[in-house]
Image (cartoon, rainbow, N blue to C red):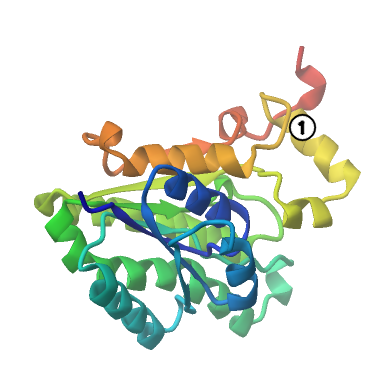
Amino acid sequence: MEKKVCIVTGAARGIGLATSRLFHSHGYEVVMVDRDFIELEKNSKSMEHTYVLDCDVSIPEQVSELFDKVQNKYRRLNCLVNNAGVAEFGPIESVSYSDWRRVMATNLDGVFLCSQAAIPMLKNSKGSIVNIASISGLRASTLRVSYGTSKAAVIQLSKQQAVELGEYSIRVNCVAPGPVKTKLAMAVHTQEIINAYHDAIPLNRYGSEEEIGNLIYFLCSDKASYITGQLVAADGGFDSTGVGLPALRC
């Protein structure tokens, strides 16, 4: 029996790497994609039979080449995880247009380009797409004008895709992670920020990369066969609290 094939973008580290490992552990042929090819190769070595590809998802020509390679190698695709993303934080008045476009090009254009390129193969498999947004696309916060706006757009794009692609039995869902304990987050979050997040999140902690990966895997799997067009916030209840007043907590 042919193994199912999954593409994960932004797979060199963090949620993308954890998700790739999870799919691999369930017997998938995993296509790991990232523009940081050195890190991608290093972190994929523990997983046999993965296919690692260097690709900047914001560049149409590279995306087209990526999907040509997958088509030529496997002749099939069962799921696409659009995880690649970048962030640019700063006050609205100081964000340059080039910074704005850099974030939009990867976070939004990349999802559009990869999803569109995947459709022919996903039609054949009646496959699925999971787009990774962010809690910043659901609740506004300071210093995230480009990042938050790009992720809000990904949420709407996911709904558009689900409505149109449902005709072909292609399911599309969206995951909005809350604060996640990645190496990058822990490197830039001060203890004060960590404490503030813990106070604002009902579960009183950051999520793990594996916890987000578990949700992504479920949404791609046959167990989610009647779920499409949905947004799931994997955030420990962060979005439910609104602004949140830690002093009023029990």
Q: Residue furthest right?
A: 191
Say left or right for 82 vs 250: left
Q: Which residue is mark 1?
A: 198
CA neighbours of label 1 inside 10 A, class few (<14), some (14 to 19), many (20+): some
5, above or below 109, in the image: above
Please provide percent x and percent y for residue 211.
Answer: 56, 37
**Camera-side residue of 110 and 240:** 110
Q: Residue furthest bottom?
A: 61
181, above or below 153, in the image: above
Please provide percent x and percent y for residue 245.
Answer: 75, 27
State the image quarter where residue 102 is shown.
bottom right
- Secondary structure, mark 1, is helix
**Camera-side residue of 27 and 156:** 27
> What residue is drawn where x is 28% and y is 44%?
229
Please provide percent x and percent y for residue 13.
Answer: 62, 60
Q: Is residue 138 visible?
A: no
State the image quarter where residue 191 is shown.
top right
104, above or below 148, in the image: below
Say left or right for 105 vs 5: right
**Camera-side residue of 27 and 237:** 27
Please provide percent x and percent y for residue 185.
Answer: 74, 53
> What residue is drawn where x is 20% and y is 49%?
1
**Amino acid at dot 1:** His
Q: Is residue 141 visible?
A: yes
State the image quarter where residue 160 is shown.
bottom left
> What residue is drawn where x is 77% and y is 18%?
248
**From the image, which quarter does the C terminus lie in?**
top right
> What residue is drawn where x is 89% and y is 42%?
192
